[in-house]
Amino acid sequence: MKHIYTFNFDSHLTDLFQLETRQIFGKAATSKMLFSDKEVDPSISPFIKRRFDIHFSANTYEQLLDRVEQEDIEIEGFKAEYTILGEDSTSYAERLNKLRDVGMRIQGIPNYLQPTRIYSICQYKGVWYFGTLAKHDTSWYKHKDKPHSFSNSLGMELAKSLVCIASEGNKDVSLLDGCCGVGTVMLEACISDFQIEGCDISSHSTQYAAQNLAHFGYSAQVHHCDIKELHKQYEAAILDLPYNFYSYSDDAITANIIQSASRLAKKLVIVSLADIENVITQFSMKVTDFCTVEKKGNSKFQRNS
């Protein structure tokens, strides 16, 4: 395997996390780490914290150090970090000593605050690894301060994960947010450079979505229309089906949205408060994967995606 991914997530999002890893990596992570040959930008996901790119491995720590020295690495402004995997119980003091060993075998002056490259070592099941780190960028947290929001808007973590699930981690995939509301999903797609457009039948929603996008300097098209009026093809569509007093819905409206979206995209990622599998199967589609997402705390509110 070429990469080691480490994850972090709250317990109430466990099902969502596992669905996301199945869609991106083709398998669910059974713990908070995963080996994979697939390279994914950690910042696209709310759950991926680090991607450790493996340069080489060794059966002993001493062999690893010898190999680092043989590589004759020359770089200014580097940093070395220790990545803890699984049940690694190496003490903090010992980790610092090992980082000092590695740093002494790299030629150049380190920069701990703004490194040009982060090298890392880790061990797992008796094997030592050396490589470089790509870290999660938390700048998407700024979307908490978007100018407009609805009380029923998707949470940011769910919105970000939906983009990952729909795209399978591929930034070249064209996406549609078919019930975009104030643009919560679109914001998470835009900050990670995904290609996305949105539509909503509500003029207030599309105005708010456009203003939210402009507030953060993103450019993505927002269509004020019924989804059935769209004709452009997309590779995947995300649908947070409307509900409650902000956006009236019934079975006919739900069927119209799903049928229209199925005409525009081969893959649909649908968020619903109700079981809609019978509606989905009406239009020659089938559910290939799903999860249930609960709000944090004691609330029984659930979304199925």
Image: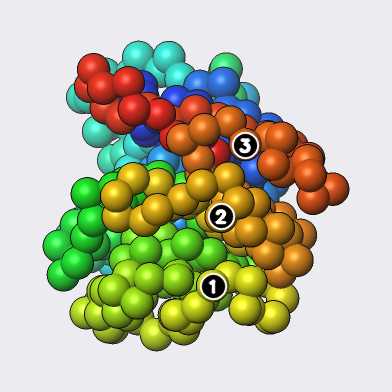
- Label 1 near label 2: C-beta < 8 Å? no
Residue tagged 1: 226
Closer-to-camera residue (128/286): 286
Closer-to-camera residue (268/76): 268
Q: Residue at x 60, y 59 (%)?
A: 257
Residue type beneath disc 3: Ile
Q: What percent of the width, then of the height, locates residue 186?
A: 42, 67
Tag 1 secondary structure: loop
Q: What percent of the width, then of the height, locates residue 94?
A: 27, 24
Q: Residue at x 53, y 64 (%)?
A: 178
Residue type beneath disc 1: Asp
What whole-number distance in Å separates the C-alpha atoms at marks 2 and 3? 12 Å
Residue tagged 2: 253
What whole-number distance in Å separates the C-alpha atoms at marks 2 and 1? 10 Å
Residue tagged 3: 276
Looking at marks 3 and 1 on the same chain, the residue that comes earlier in the sequence is marked by: 1
Mark 3 crowdedness (10 Å alpha carbons): few <14, some 14-19, many ≥20: some
Looking at marks 2 and 3 on the same chain, the residue that comes earlier in the sequence is marked by: 2
Depth check, mark 2 against mark 3: the one in front is 2
Q: What percent of the width, then of the height, locates residue 256?
A: 64, 58
